[in-house]
Image (tube, coloured by chain):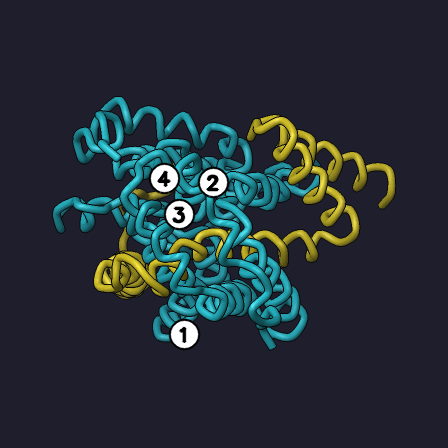
Amino acid sequence: MNQFPDLTSFSLEAVLTILGMAAVTYGMRLGGLLMADRLPQHGRWAHVLERLPGAVLISVWVPSALSAGAIGIAGAAATVITMALARNLFAAMAVGMVLVGLGRYFIS
Amino acid sequence: MSRPGPAQIGHFDSDTIRRGALACLPLLPSTIIFGAVLGVLASQRGLSLGELLFMSLTVFAGSAQFVSVDLWRETIPAATIIVATAVINMRYILIGASLRPVFKGRPLWVKICGMHMVADENWAVSMTQENLANPGFLLGGGIFLGVVWAAGNMIGYLLGGGIPDPEVYALDFAFTAVFAALTIGMWKGKVDLLPWVAAAIGSIIGHYTLPGTWSILAGAGAGVVTAALTWRPDMDDDSLEAEIAVEGRDAYGAPEGTGTTATLSPEAGK
């Protein structure tokens, strides 16, 4: 904290590791898109591909709501309901976060 | 079915990039705090600030970076870190695949340039745009999140501690909340019901039975299998139309109900 950290100190090992991480991550990002490009534009595969974003999104937040315990589940439910009614991302996030914040403050 | 203007203008139109960045604004506080927490962790694990920033801008994937920095030692376990990164980020194959309509008809170089700054957050925000977002919108969100993420890293690294605990202000819940809220915007009609239920069940089962982020793949897998099994040829016209239409949500909505009636039981993940 006393001296400014050296921005330019890069060890070869670290750089190679990071490049490896970056390569696999970018490879999967681009690879997923290019693979999807090769799938048929209609029919079963197109139908599956259209359901994919919702399925991924649900699978991202449902487990993390569970990890946050009962208040997390309540917060996620409040967020979803607010969004369905108000169609406002800010409002929906605020309702969920305030509920979780208050819940943690008062309950635990 | 004519497609006027907006969706097909420039690949990385500057106004669209700006709109994409603004759309990710609600994520600023959480991203900066989590970036700072990672910065503190990195300073304890012996990464230099330069290495951390290099990682944040080349890998650009929060949860994988947390795990990797946590595994970081004097002698870097490179193979372990790279394998862990690959496993955690495997969902990007699905995320990349789902971006097909956003990049539809664009040249390869646009895909190559546009797919790097894709995080869960700007992906989700882009996928729920009324007029299905174009690559510029996606990139704008990515650049915004990248800058905020790196700024957070720097703050945490330089302070070396004293970062407020994200849990106190429920900032950790911001990511859960944004994804939960955006799910509503992805609803395209009754065809989504069974795949979504399957995804929820699959991810819940995965959450309790599998380590780490495998629950994402379990849920997405269950959703995909269910979608494949519930497809019927008479849905085909709709999906064709949906691929062509640029008015995302509106175009999907109406006539899809017919095909969905219970052909089979939801194939939940096991």
The relative height of residue B134 versus residue A45 in the rendered view (above or below) is: above
Contact (Cβ within 8 Å) of mark 2 with mark 4: no
* Residue at screen point 46% across, 44% down: B255
Judging from the image, mark 4 belongs to the subunit labelled: B
Residue B94, labelled with which disc?
none
* Residue at screen point 59% across, 44% down: B180
How much space separates mark 2 and mark 1, taking CA atoms?
Answer: 45 Å
* Residue A68 image point, x, y percent: 71, 52
The relative height of residue B25 versus residue A49 in the rendered view (above or below) is: above
Do discs 2 and 1 share a chain?
yes
Judging from the image, mark 2 belongs to the subunit labelled: B
Q: Amino acid at mark 3?
A: Ala
How much space separates mark 3 and mark 2, taking CA atoms?
Answer: 27 Å
- Reading the image, the residue beneath label 1 is B80
* Residue at screen point 44% across, 32% down: B24
* Residue B37 image point, x, y percent: 54, 45
Q: Name the outermost residue toward the bottom.
A: B270
Q: Secondary structure at mark 4?
A: helix
Q: Can you tell which quarter of the image residue B102 is in?
A: top left
- Reading the image, the residue beneath label 2 is B253
- Reading the image, the residue beneath label 3 is B119
Q: Earlier in the sequence, mark 2 or mark 4?
A: 4
How much space separates mark 2 and mark 4, taking CA atoms?
Answer: 34 Å
- Reading the image, the residue beneath label 4 is B146
